[in-house]
Image (cartoon, rainbow, N blue to C red):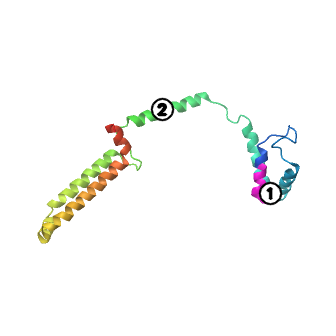
Amino acid sequence: MECSKIMDMYYEYSGNDSRGNDSNSAGAISLLDQIQISLHTFFCQDCARKIELYESARIIMSHDFFRSAPELEDSIMKRITAEEEIHDTQEILISPGGFSTRSWVIAGLVLMVSLVTAFFGLEFNYLANESGMSFLLPMGITIGIVLTIYGALFIGSHLKELSERFGL
């Protein structure tokens, strides 16, 4: 028989402590199944080791393995509530990506100023004179698209914070 079938059979019967009960009770392992498991574990050392580890863990966990510690529970709960209060009172909201709202706003302002000041450079005047007024339309559309995408990313990544702040 395969190891997985033997182990499944052992796990099925191992949860039922029918050692002290009548052997005919429901959930008791049959003699044929006991023989199959014993023969398999005699020849398969991996399954024998798994069964031994399982039995050791079951014995350990059947007793009170961890003592109750109410003072530890109280201190942990106090720390959790303190961290929640600190998180609620923070002025700088951190997005899941790790950037604060302040960083997003500063980067947006720098982006907007750099795009708007592109019109005042000497290179722009030369390109505008060479291309004519048809150059202004694509430039304006590009600036609009960049600012719209940045605004959408900012709002999308801070939707929860913004809705809480503005009561939406």
- Residue 134: x %, y % from top left: 15, 67
**Range of the magenta residues?**
1-10
**Residue carrying label 1:** 45
- Residue 93 is at least partly visible in this image: no
Q: Is residue 119 found left or right of 167 in the rendered image?
A: left
Q: Residue at x 31, y 38 (%)?
A: 166
Badge 1 density bin: few <14, some 14–19, many ≥20, Cα 10 Å: few
Is residue 88 visible to us here? yes
- Image height check: is 74 above or below 55? above
Query: Would residue 82 appear left or right of 74 to someone viewing this image?
Result: left
Q: Residues within 10 Å of mark 2 (few under 14, many from 20)?
A: few
Amino acid found under the numbered disc labelled 1: Gln
**For the residues marked 1 and 2, what is the alpha-carbon distance in whole angstroms?**
50 Å
Q: Provide the major secondary structure of the magenta segment.
A: helix
127 or 151: nearer the viewer = 151
Q: Mark 1 vs mark 2: which is more N-terminal?
A: 1
Q: SS for tag 2?
A: helix
Answer left or right for 69 relative to 108: right
Q: Quadrant of the C terminus?
A: top left
SS type, badge 1 = helix
Residue found at x 77% / y 58% = 3
Q: Percent x, y for residue 39?
A: 86, 56
Q: Amino acid at mark 2?
A: Thr
Q: Which residue is mark 2?
A: 81
In percent of width and height, residue 141 lies at 22, 61
Residue 79, label in figure: none
**Vertically, is 145 above or below 89?**
below
Q: Is residue 7 magenta?
A: yes
